[in-house]
Image: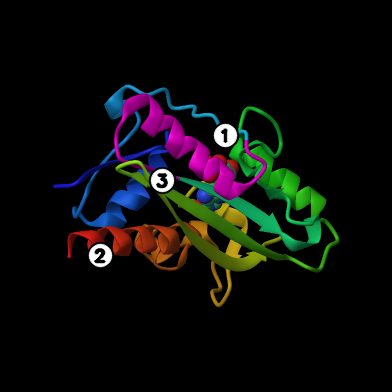
């Protein structure tokens, strides 16, 4: 079975992606190859960070790998938190504090439009490929739901009456930013072996 390292230290993301791959590829985490989990992500853009993380793993460990970077882009905040999504409220990457800061900044704001933007970067035999996914939606006035992670409790995907945190994992994957980008990755990998 083809082995790929998913260059993330986030166990939620690894679980989401493993569920989507349905056993077709063996996905290993950074811990499995003895790589530190805090990878450099100093680029000012989402695609830049995705590539930076994948390059780090490929250059230092010589394995085929993919990484992903995601940002929540809120229209009324000029695209913030964007590339700063993980550390929006501080370097401790506290998801609750991040959500509270978003809600505070949007107080009294009627434009609640937002989107999650994901870029998956794959390095396969030294060649780089990128795949994108976007989930449009709105920011709720208060958090709701206990599933998912990060900003899920305040993000309601377009066309749904619930937040990502109120959906099951498979339901979220079917429409999410990461789901779309990972499906493109899977289609690409399948195309290679066809
Ligand atoms: P990163 O891609 O790990 O740098 O994540 C950036 C930030 O976006 C973190 O605060 C994550 O918690 C958040 N994030 C990434 N993906 C999701 C998601 O699917 N739902 C909610 N928050 C997310």
Q: Which residue is mark 1?
A: 41
**Residue stretch in magenta:** 43-67
Q: Which residue is mark 2?
A: 191
Q: Is there CB contact under 8 Å for labels 2 and 3?
A: no
Q: Which residue is mark 3?
A: 13
Task: Find out if the beta carbon at label 1 lies less than 8 Å from the nearest ligand 1 atom.
Answer: yes
Question: Residue 140 placed where, x, y %?
Answer: 67, 62
Q: Any magenta on residue 50?
A: yes
- The answer to whether residue 40 is above or below residue 10 is above
Give the mark count. 3
Task: Find out if the beta carbon at label 3 lies less than 8 Å from the nearest ligand 1 atom.
Answer: yes
Q: Which quarter of the figure has residue 130?
A: bottom left
Residues under labels 1 and 2: Cα distance?
30 Å
CA neighbours of label 2 inside 10 A, class few (<14), some (14 to 19), many (20+): few
Question: Residue 118 placed where, x, y %?
Answer: 52, 55
Q: Which quarter of the figure has residue 95?
A: top right
Q: How is the image coloured?
A: rainbow
Q: Which quarter of the figure has residue 6?
A: top left
Q: Is residue 181 left or right of residue 157?
A: left
Residues under labels 3 and 1: Cα distance?
17 Å
The C terminus - image quarter? bottom left
Q: Is there CB contact under 8 Å for labels 1 and 2?
A: no
Q: Is residue 167 visible?
A: yes
Q: Residue at x 62, y 56 (%)?
A: 154
């Amino acid at each position: 079975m083809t082995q790929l390292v998913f260059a993330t230290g986030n166990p939620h993301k690894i679980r989401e992606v493993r569920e989507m791959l349905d056993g077709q590829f063996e996905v290993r985490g950074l811990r499995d190859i003895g790589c530190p989990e805090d990878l450099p992500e100093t680029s000012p853009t989402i695609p830049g960070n995705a590539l930076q993380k994948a390059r780090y793993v490929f250059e230092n460990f010589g394995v085929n790998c993919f990484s992903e970077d995601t940002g929540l882009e809120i229209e009324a905040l000029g695209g913030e938190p964007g590339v700063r999504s993980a550390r929006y409220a501080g370097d401790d990457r506290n998801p609750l504090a991040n959500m509270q800061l978003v809600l505070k900044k949007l107080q009294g704001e009627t434009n609640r439009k937002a989107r999650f933007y994901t870029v998956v970067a794959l390095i396969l035999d030294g060649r780089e490929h990128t795949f994108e996914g976007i989930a449009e939606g709105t920011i709720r006035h208060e958090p709701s739901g206990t599933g998912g992670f990060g900003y899920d409790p305040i993000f309601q995907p377009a066309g749904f009456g619930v937040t990502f945190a109120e959906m099951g994992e498979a339901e979220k994957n079917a429409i999410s930013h990461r789901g779309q980008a990972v499906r493109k990755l899977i289609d690409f990998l399948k195309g290679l072996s066809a």
